Structure formats: C-alpha cells, structure tokens
Image (cartoon, coloured by chain):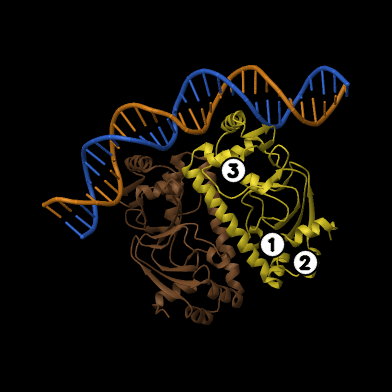
Chain colours: A brown, B yellow, C orange, D blue
Amino acid sequence: MPKLSQREIEVLKKSTILKGIDPNAVASILGEAQWTGTAKGDTLFQQGEAAIRLFILLQGKIKLSQVNSEGNQVLLRILGPGEVIAGVSAFENTVYPATATALEKCAALSFDRPHLLRLMERHPQISLNVNRILLGRMQELQDRFRELATERVEKRVACALIRLARANGRKTPEGILIDLPLSRQDLAELTGTTLYTVSRLLKAWEGKGILKSERKRITLIQPRELASVAGEMPQALP
Amino acid sequence: MPKLSQREIEVLKKSTILKGIDPNAVASILGEAQWTGTAKGDTLFQQGEAAIRLFILLQGKIKLSQVNSEGNQVLLRILGPGEVIAGVSAFENTVYPATATALEKCAALSFDRPHLLRLMERHPQISLNVNRILLGRMQELQDRFRELATERVEKRVACALIRLARANGRKTPEGILIDLPLSRQDLAELTGTTLYTVSRLLKAWEGKGILKSERKRITLIQPRELASVAGEMPQALP
DNA sequence: CGCTATTTTGAGATGGCTCAAGCTATGTGG
DNA sequence: CCACATAGCTTGAGCCATCTCAAAATAGCG
C-alpha cells in the first residue's frame, strides 16, 4: 500500500482516468495499487515485454518510443502527471507495443489486469474515461501522421515545438520554456527527421530571434513567428 | 426504423462494437438506428462537419481520409462491414476529424449522440468494445507512423499491400486479390508518397512476377517475396 | 580536470518529388 | 456498337530537400 503525498492524491483525483469518480472510492482504489519510482533514464517497461500492468503517472515525465527492426526509433508521445500509460494491459493479454522511459525522476502507481478489471466493473466511468483518452491520443497521432506524410521537415518541427509548448510550456521572463529535457535526437524522433536537421533548424530560428536553443532546453521567444512557420495553429499558448 | 436483411443482422451481431451483447437487446437497439445508403464515391460525412452521428458499416468499404490546409490528402484507414466509423461523436461535441468516402456501394446504420449515450449506459459492454477498437487502431496507426518516420518508400508500400491483403484479401486462382478499388493515388496517400512512385514500384514488382497490377486492382502472386521487401511480417496471409 | 554526451558544422550524395507528356482502359452518349 | 471523353496510369528527365558521414566544438558530469 503506497503512501502518497497530498499533492499526489490531488494529481490522481484529477487524472484523466479517474476523473469523475467519487473521491472516497478513489481512496479505496489506491489500496490496490503498487507504487513505482524511477530515476531519470530508467524504463518503466520495454517494448515486447508482457503487458501486465497499467500505470498512472504521479510525477515526472515519461517518453513512449518504438523501435523498428533496424533499431531506428520514433517518439510516440510524452506523458505527464495524471496521465495513463499502457492502456493495452487492461484489454488484451499481449505485449507492450512501446518502451516507456523516464525523462526525469518519476513516480507512478500501477495496477495489474485483475485489479483493473474489477475496478472498471465497479466504476463504469473509468471505461468512459479511457475512451476519451484514447480518442484524444488517436486524433493527435492522426494529425502527426498527416504532417509526416504531407509536410516539410521545417513545418513538422515547428508544429512539434508548439505542441510541446502547449503541453509542457512554462512562462519565464524570457519566453515560454519547454520544460522537458529533450535532446536534438529526441526532437528528431518526434518529427521523423535526423538530429542534424533539427540542429540546423534550431540554429536558424535562434538566429532570427524566434527561440533560444540550449542543451536539452528550448525557450520560445516569439511563438507567433514559429506558429506562422507551422502554418497557423490559432490557439493561444500558455 | 430500418429494414435489414438476415445477412445484415448477422454483420451487426458480430460487429466490433456490439460483440458480446445479448442478441435480443441488439434487436431493440436497432429500432433506434437510422439507415443510410451511399453510392460509390459518395461521402458519409466530411472533415470539419459537426460530429453528430456514429456509423456502423453494414456493407461495402469506406475510406477515411484527412486533408491539410494545402489540400494534400492522407488515407487514415479503410473500414469494412461491422466496423465503426466516427467514434468521436459519442464522446465529444466536436467535428469529424476526417472525411468518410465510399469505395463502393455502402450501407450503414447510425446513431445520434443521445441514443448512443443511452445505449452505452444500458450496455456497458459497448464502452469496453469501443476501448478495444480504439486500442487496436491506435496500435496500427503507431506502426504506420513508425514506418513513415523510419522506412523507405519501397518498404512502406510493401507493408501497406500486405496489410491490405490481410484485411481485404480474397483467394483467387492467380493469387491473393486485394478486393478494393484503390487507385495509385489512394496507395500513395496511404503510404505518404506520390502516385508516380507507387506506379513505378508496382511496375517493377510486376516485372519480377511478385504481383499483378491492373487499374484499381492488385493481385499478389508471390506474397513471400513482397513480405521480404517489407522486412518480414511473419503471419500468414489468407 | 578529464571524460563523455551532446551539439554544431561542412561537404557531398541521393531518394524521391516535380512537372510534363503520352498512353490506355472504361464507360458513355450518339 | 462505335467513337470519343475522361479518369487513371506510365514514363522520362531534372532537381532539390534532406540524409549521410566525418570531424570539430561545447557543455556538463563524476
């Protein structure tokens, strides 16, 4: 039985998967969970392992990536506190389709399949929540798929930075800091290009004063300019 | 109240979304559905329209595609009888993220959101089924995303043909016919390339006796050879 | 302070795209 | 039933965005 801070309990109550469930019930749910902590760089699970647990991230950021047979990687998504990892485990007796790596120190709760199934039976809302989560991710992935199929590298990277800023942006005096330790390689895997091309693009944008690019640290200075490269994504940034 | 053939009712009972539900209940569900027929080339709904209905395909094949702002298309997926189209409509008051076009004469049932929500309340199994459907599609899309990001065109097209054969293949004396009227353009949109490149690839493979490529009609003669171009996908073909 | 991971930069190669033009089924209307 | 229109397909030639590979510069870490 894990011991959670007040903050972590707050995260859980607002988590995408437990949203809308009676807070008292949430407390009892937690009794069945297992706590896991990982250091930066550790993996929560590996692509190909038997998918036996579903994780809810309490703290930190996780990247989900896939490799092909030649060892080339793609970065499928980045997850933050309150998000669910490995929805598969609940439904199919199968293997994890991707590897989950901690971008920073992380904490997570996890449930095994029997627990999860019982939970879902007791709280039908969970299943609705999972639907909503999957739909949202599906749509984002469809968008990225379309981008990858039809857009130039420059635009894809610009879009990726804007999405990252929206999900992980933190206002600072200089601009919007993308609060994730992502290397050029990570960015390349996120957008389907090479680290060399990413490096050149960032340098060029830095030269124009659009952003500040440091080692594993990017700050958007003129998000407007970047959005226009990305081909207009009208919504506001943090 | 639609009038359905026995065959269509069978399709429904086995459909991915109604699987596992009491057949008698299914009958009553149908009472709330609306029937839609479309000719080849018609669209069921357009990207950007208000997403108010969820469709279950009874007959025919539908392609789901997305356009970007410059009018470039990608083909997201192809759906057959028993499959669900536009899961969005159930969960979010939003717009269709893609356009659904009939590849051949089609028939479908549809439900509007209020009906759907009531159904899901009455039959929690539906929501579980939707989860399973979304997960499956998610995984396929992730695979295609990885391919698009890391593989050469040749391999991507080979993979696409094998997937199509697996889902829509029909054994004929000559080989495995991909039983869908897909143009070179469609295949290009499915794999993120141009119709010219697809045409050249198919010609080359035809020259090697791997397949027979006609107008909107492809027959795999030596699926093994194609699988080896695709980099080994071990499972059997129909 | 030295080691290693990360990033930058250059130069050259090329896969696949673009554009243009001709070809061929298919089906349609006279 | 034929001739013509049209959508779909093939082919060639040239180009260029992006990848590759190599090597040096930088930054953080132990």
Disc 3 to disc 1, how far (Cα)?
25 Å
Q: Is residue A174 at all visible to an observer of this figure? A: yes
Q: Secondary structure at mark 2?
A: helix
Amino acid tagged 1: Ile
Disc 3 to disc 2, how far (Cα)?
35 Å
Residue position for label 1:
B17
Mark positioned earlier in the residue sequence (3 or 1):
1
Query: Is mark 2 in CB contact (under 8 Å) with mark 1?
Result: no
Mark in front: 3 vs 2:
3
Q: Is residue B74 at all visible to an observer of this figure? A: no
Against A221, residue A41 (above or below) is below
Mark positioned earlier in the residue sequence (3 or 2):
2
Q: Chain of mark 1?
A: B
Task: Choose top left, top right, bottom left or bottom right for residue B197.
Answer: top right
Graded by Cα atoms within 10 Å as few (under 14), some (14 to 19) or many (20 or more), the crowding at tag 1 reads many
Amino acid tagged 2: Val
Quick check: B37 left or right of B67?
A: right
Task: Choose top left, top right, bottom left or bottom right for residue B9.
Answer: bottom right
Against A18, residue B182 (above or below) is above
Mark in front: 3 vs 1:
3
Q: Secondary structure at mark 3?
A: helix
Residue position for label 2:
B26
The image quadrant where one finds the N terminus of chain A is bottom left
Residue position for label 3:
B160
Q: Chain of mark 3?
A: B
Q: Which mark is residue B135?
A: none
The image quadrant where one finds the C terminus of chain A is bottom left
Percent coordinates x, y for residue B230 in the rendering: 54, 42
Disc 2 to disc 1, how far (Cα)?
11 Å
Q: Secondary structure at mark 1?
A: loop
The residue shown at (49%, 81%) is A27
